[in-house]
Image (spheres, rainbow, N blue to C red):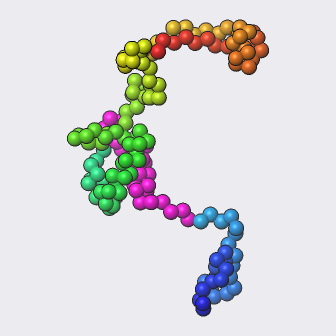
């Protein structure tokens, strides 16, 4: 076992001297998979405005050549960016920078159906918005004192 360091928490000085202990909380280098590094580079391109919302990004082949990685690595990075809603894939066309138009994201988690189960276009209209004193029942539900100020908002969805 000659040459092996029995104490992994210490390192040897380059001058061959006694081992020097590393601080217990010293940050260790973290490993990041290659596709995550490519994802970060593409994200930087998006943040810097290299590709604007609605624009086509370069193909997987072009990005692979640019970053000197395999097409599969680029594909995995793009898959994550699509899952993060930063990019949008259109089959047979290309991959685009997401636009996040208000209509598309506004009802992302809300699905309203009519009584007959049909899906209808979403309507979102403000009917009323005003300040008032909380009625006793509302104050109780909101854990407020009666007559505390509240905002009444009525919307048509």
Q: Is residue 25 visible?
A: yes
Q: Is residue 11 left or right of residue 112?
A: right
| Figure quadrant of the N terminus | bottom right
Give the x, y percent position of residue 67: 34, 58
Residue 94 is inside the magenta segment = no
Q: Residue at x 37, y 47 (%)?
A: 79
Q: Is residue 131 left or right of residue 123?
A: right
Q: Residue at x 47, y 29 (%)?
A: 109
Region of the chain picked out in magenta, as a range = 29-56
- Front-most of residues 35 and 118: 118
Give the x, y percent position of residue 130: 61, 9
Residue extending farthest to the front is 116
Above or below, 81 against 100 in this view is below
User: Residue 13's image quarter?
Assistant: bottom right
How many numbered discs?
0
Give the x, y percent position of residue 11: 64, 79
Q: Residue at x 37, y 19 (%)?
A: 119
Q: Is residue 56 visible?
A: no
- Front-most of residues 57 and 76: 76
Above or below, 150 against 81 in this view is above
Give the x, y percent position of residue 74: 34, 54
Q: Residue at x 70, y 69 (%)?
A: 23
Residue extending farthest to the right is 145
Residue extending farthest to the bottom is 2
Above or below, 119 against 36 in this view is above
Q: Is residue 70 left or right of residue 146?
A: left
Above or below, 26 against 140 in this view is below
């Amino acid at each position: 076992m000659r040459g092996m360091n029995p104490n992994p928490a210490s390192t040897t000085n380059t001058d061959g001297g006694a081992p020097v202990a590393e601080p217990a909380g010293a940050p260790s280098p973290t490993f990041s998979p290659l596709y995550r590094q490519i994802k970060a580079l593409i994200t930087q391109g998006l943040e810097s405005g290299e590709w604007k919302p609605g624009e086509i990004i370069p193909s997987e082949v072009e990005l692979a050549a640019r970053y000197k990685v395999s097409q599969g690595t680029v594909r995995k990075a793009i898959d994550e960016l699509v899952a993060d809603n930063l990019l949008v894939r259109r089959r047979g066309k290309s991959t685009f920078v997401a636009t996040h138009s208000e209509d598309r994201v506004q009802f992302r988690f809300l699905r309203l159906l009519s009584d007959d189960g049909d899906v209808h276009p979403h309507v979102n209209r403000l009917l009323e918005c005003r300040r008032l004193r909380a009625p006793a029942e509302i104050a109780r539900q909101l854990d407020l004192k009666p007559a505390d100020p509240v905002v009444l908002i009525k919307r048509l969805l």
